[in-house]
Amino acid sequence: MEAQALQFFIACVTAAGFGIAVAAFGCGIAQGLGLKAAVEGIARNPESSGKVTVTMLIGLAMIESLCIYALVIALILIYAHPQAAAIAGLFAH
Amino acid sequence: MAHPYLFFVKLFEAIGLGHFAHSYPHVIYSWVVMIILITLGVIAAKSVSLIPGKAQNVFEVIISGIENFMIDVTGEEGRWLFPLVATIFIYIFSCNLIGLVPGFFPPTASLNTTASCALTVVIFTHIIGIKYHGVKYIKHFLGPVWWMIPIVFPIEVIGHLARILSLSFRLFGNMMGHELVLGILFVLAGLFFAPLPIMALGIFVALVQAFVFFLLSMMYFTGAMEHAH
């Protein structure tokens, strides 16, 4: 029972690590694409720099929030796990 | 996760309400932010004159800036929404910023605060819809053609529930992640001032997240007020 609980906890922490890594990878690409389009827009029309910058920041915050969802799940897996009592019992010895 | 040193929590311990203060630091710091904002508001409103002095000028610039931006997004009929969305923006911005003061805990780093703000916004969206359209508000959920209703209606309902989740989790995740990174960096390399760049990023994140919450609230209100497509 102890060994199974420990394996479960190891699997959870591994999943958390890989989950946030994949999320950060996707978020990086997406924000890079958005930033690329914004900079191209400013380069073509420097007068619109203010509006383009504001729109770009809002878009970046939206994309970043997807990565934050994955971060919250990863934190739940490591720290606020539903089986928190059983896992805490593992480390009590 | 170690419990950081929180100034007001220690204050409550001295009074004797230590157990309450340790379990609910977000409530205590929400009250701190509220008292600060109400005090600022009272000071600003006390000496309103036709020719503005320096402090009144600053407040006028801030408030009129927010109002003009709001009218840009919602149009002229959304002017009555200004007190709610401006309160949301200023309250969330202050809550986020107060976490950067050493010894203070940002109330928005707890899911309770952010979920309450998100619930207020989404329920108010529906109240606006019913107030403007009456029973025909249901048309917003039914899609363009009548034979797609069984598909479109659950998707719209889930979309509205997802708004609550996304609003609250976006703000909570940003603030809690910031607090976690600060705590870990402090434990790892506190003597070398390692948390300082993260705190500089924190000011930027505080403003952006408050602004995004404010902008999304306005877009949801505008969507409820306009006619269904």
Image: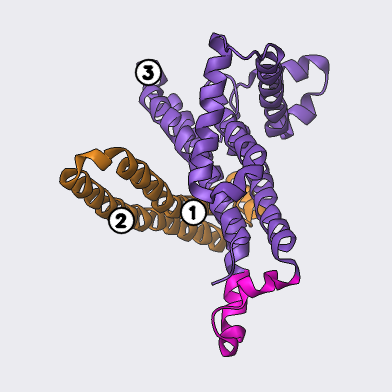
| Residue A23 picture location, percent across and down | 37, 56
| Residue A44 picture location, percent across and down | 16, 47
Q: What stretch is highlighted in magenta?
A: B135-157
- Looking at the rendered structure, the secondary structure element under dot 3 is loop
Q: In which quarter of the image is the N terminus of chain A?
A: bottom right
Q: At label 3, which amino acid type do we have?
A: Phe
Q: Nearer the viewer, residue A72 or B124?
A: B124
- Looking at the rendered structure, the secondary structure element under dot 2 is helix
Q: Residue at x 35, y 52 (%)?
A: A24
- Of all chains in the rendering, the one displayed in purple is B
Residue B222, quarter of picture:
bottom right
- Looking at the rendered structure, the secondary structure element under dot 1 is helix
Q: Nearer the viewer, residue A2 or B84?
A: B84
| Residue B96 picture location, percent across and down | 55, 31
Q: Residue at x 62, y 60 (%)?
A: B224
Q: Does the magenta stretch include residue B161?
A: no
Q: State how many labels appear.
A: 3
Residue at which label 2 appears: A30
Upstream in sequence: badge 2 or badge 1: 2
* Residue B111 showing in the rendered view: no
Residue at which label 1 appears: A69
In the figure, is residue B228 to the left or right of A25? right
Chain under disc 1: A
Q: Quadrant of the C terminus of chain A?
A: top right
Residue at which label 3 appears: B193
- The residues tagged by marks 3 and 2 sit, at their Cα atoms, a distance apart of 32 Å
- The residues tagged by marks 2 and 1 sit, at their Cα atoms, a distance apart of 15 Å
- The residues tagged by marks 3 and 1 sit, at their Cα atoms, a distance apart of 29 Å
- Of all chains in the rendering, the one displayed in orange is A
